[in-house]
Image: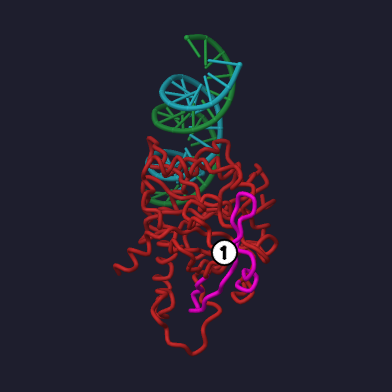
Chain colours: A red, B cyan, C green
Amino acid sequence: MAEHDDDVLLPRFFKVFLSESASESFAIPLSFMEHLADPLPNTAKLQGTGGRDWTVNMTKIRDGVYFTAGWSKFAQDHELVDGEFLTFVYDGHRTFEVSVFGRLGCKETRAEVEAIAVDGSSSDSDGSSSDSEEERELSMDFYGDTSLGEDEEISQSLYPLEDEETESDSAVVEGNLDIEALTNPHFSTTLKNRIYELLIPANVVKENKLTFGDSVKYIDGEGTLVGLRGKWADDRICFKGWDRICRRNRLKKHQDTVECELLHDRNKVHSIRVHIMRGTT
DNA sequence: AGGTAAACAGGCATAAGATA
DNA sequence: TATCTTATGCCTGTTTACCT
């Protein structure tokens, strides 16, 4: 338990896998570079949930850092397909613990070690976690940033670097997201006139007995942004900063639909994962 | 079917920030 | 410092769901 608490403090990031841009090399988000060891090690160890390790080269290209040689082997061994989520927990030296979340939103164990005793180094591989526990673990992965409520952190997150926006992958789904497959509470929305706020439909809140804090993280293929809770005279629940999601994903009115998946920990929503479906309205 | 309440979109006013 | 732009809270009208 205490071990898990320590783990939560480790820096982490997530990305959506897109074969088009990530089959040969994999870009580490620019905003994560401040956490990387200095000087940058030549290689990194990727620890899969199946208990195996992969060594990959870490290469600095222009202003970014990429996993290069060895990454394609990792991707192949994990049978990564477009749209799957990867989370990376960094130990501060050269090891990344990588978790794979399938398109159904569940954590998956892949590239397993055959008939080998688990050495206990990975809390993910004990094989005892139930569905709900896995879901909570996913929540905790995105919960890593415990300073969510601090103004400084929020303002940084709200205004990401332009470079980050243009260089990272997009989580756009071209109209083929299987909505029924989403296991978390979700709702769809479109680009409204009032783009600064995202309204959480009251029926979704009620049906799922959801609660909200003062902020949520918006998660799209570009990374995360923090939206502060809006204050309204009525009881509606809405979050600000939504316009940045709309803008950086170039949402179009009367064309695009956004499926918002509410990631929660014991019904308290901490993040909203954004699935964009082009040309569906 | 009609009345009522809840939910929601969007207009308006204004505060805050940016820029000349 | 004045002006313009952006962001946000309040308010109101419309739509929808529910109850009688």
What residue range appears in magenta? A46-74
- Name the image quarter holding residue A247: top right
The reply to whether the magenta stretch includes residue A73 is yes
- Residue A231 lies, in percent from the top left, at 39, 37
> Residue A55: percent from the left, percent from the top?
56, 72
Residue C14 sits above or below residue A18 on the image: above
Please tell me whether residue A108 belongs to the stretch shown in magenta.
Answer: no
The amino acid marked with disc number 1 is Asn
Residue designated by label 1: A42
Residue appearing at x 48%, y 45% in the figure: A157
Q: Which of A8 and A133 is in front in this view?
A: A8
Element at label 1: loop
Q: Residue at x 53, y 58 (%)?
A: A40
| Side of C12 relative to A83 (left or right) | left
Residue located at (43% from left, 58% from top):
A11
Q: Where is residue A45 in the image (x, y as percent from the top left)?
A: 52, 70
Identified at 38% across, 40% down, the residue is: A151
